[in-house]
Image (cartoon, coloured by chain):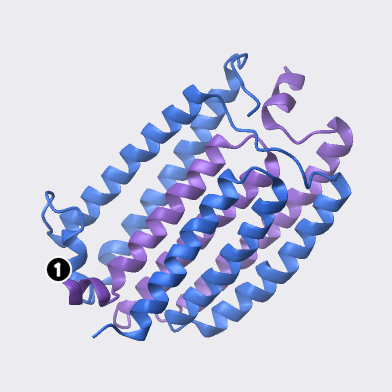
Amino acid sequence: MTESVFEVGLLHYLLLALILFIIGMTGAVVSRNMVRIVMSLLIVSISIVINFLSFGCFCNDSLKYTNIMCILITVMTVLQVTGAFALFLKVYHANEYLDVEKIKDKEN
Amino acid sequence: MVSAEAVYFYIYAIILVVSAIGVVFSPRMFFAFCAFFCTLLFSSCLYGLLDAGFMAVFQFLLCGLFLCIMLILLLRKITIWTLPLKIASRFRVALSAVVLFIFGILAYLYVNFEFGGSIGDFFGFLNEKSVDTVDFSGFSFSIHLMIIITMVMCVMLRNIYLTKNNTEDTDD
């Protein structure tokens, strides 16, 4: 029992990725600040990368190019987040706040 | 005998989970930013454990340095370093927790079904096949399909929330 707990395998990494995914999703749903929502979504993307890397590490030759896929995911995430930050700046200059629900109220 | 890899894994995993919780629930934006940087740093360390050293360096350079500098510039421009934590109303938080709990149970049942562990023992599946190698095509695609479906579900939930009358919001 103790040995199996301290032998780190695929499912340990999958469990960690699941916990991070749930935390990130909770943050994305619950937060009202746009910057915090984007940070939470980045945590979700980290959990997805951990998923891919753990499959690539523990599965025999089934995913040889995991690094390339993960780099693609990371680059896409960073590009989207950079664009989102630029939009936030515009939104902040227009509204003086970054609260999604206040902005939605203002639109209505 | 405890291997060094297991020790490193548990240390990194605990720091990652704590800092991820810090990103979401820290009372001030400055602490959230520090926790976010810790998340990026220690996830890079975790990638190193998975034989992905190049990916670790790449993520640290791109996210840990470039993205954090971008975030610092943004937070300086909009001066919200001391912005207090604002979350949705208690009803929404509770509903989101229920939805995410149901998702967790579904994910656990899925993994449990695939790996044939016992439902009674929550961590039974960890003990049985944690060191086995499995076929990628059998697991990875369906798991990532679940992830995409959940993300879409969360976006829909958020939109449903926002289209309702939100007079019950609280500023904590």
Given residues A104 and A65, the one toward you in this image is A104
Quadrant in which residue B159 is drawn:
top right
The chain whose colour is purple is A
Q: Secondary structure at mark 1?
A: helix
The number of numbered badges drawn on the structure is 1
**Residue at 53% in and 37% down:** A29
Indicate the amino acid at tag 1: Glu
**For mark 1, what is the residue?**
B128
The chain whose colour is blue is B
- Quadrant of the image containing the N terminus of chain B: bottom left
x and y percentages locating residue A6 in the rendered image: 26, 75
**Residue at 80% in and 33% down:** A97
**Residue at 64% in and 42% down:** B27
- Quadrant of the image containing the C terminus of chain B: top right
Q: Is residue A94 left or right of residue B123?
A: right
Q: Chain of mark 1?
A: B
x and y percentages locating residue B68 in the rendered image: 73, 63
Q: Is residue B78 above or below residue A103?
A: below
x and y percentages locating residue B116 in the rendered image: 12, 59
Given residues B136 and B116, the one toward you in this image is B116
Q: Is residue B45 left or right of residue B70?
A: left
x and y percentages locating residue A44 in the rendered image: 51, 54
Q: Is residue B1 above or below residue A2?
A: below
**Residue at 75% in and 40% down:** B83
- Are there few (<14), some (14-19), or many (20+) residues within 10 Å of tag 1? some
Q: Is residue B102 above or below residue B129?
A: above
Given residues B144 and A50, the one toward you in this image is A50
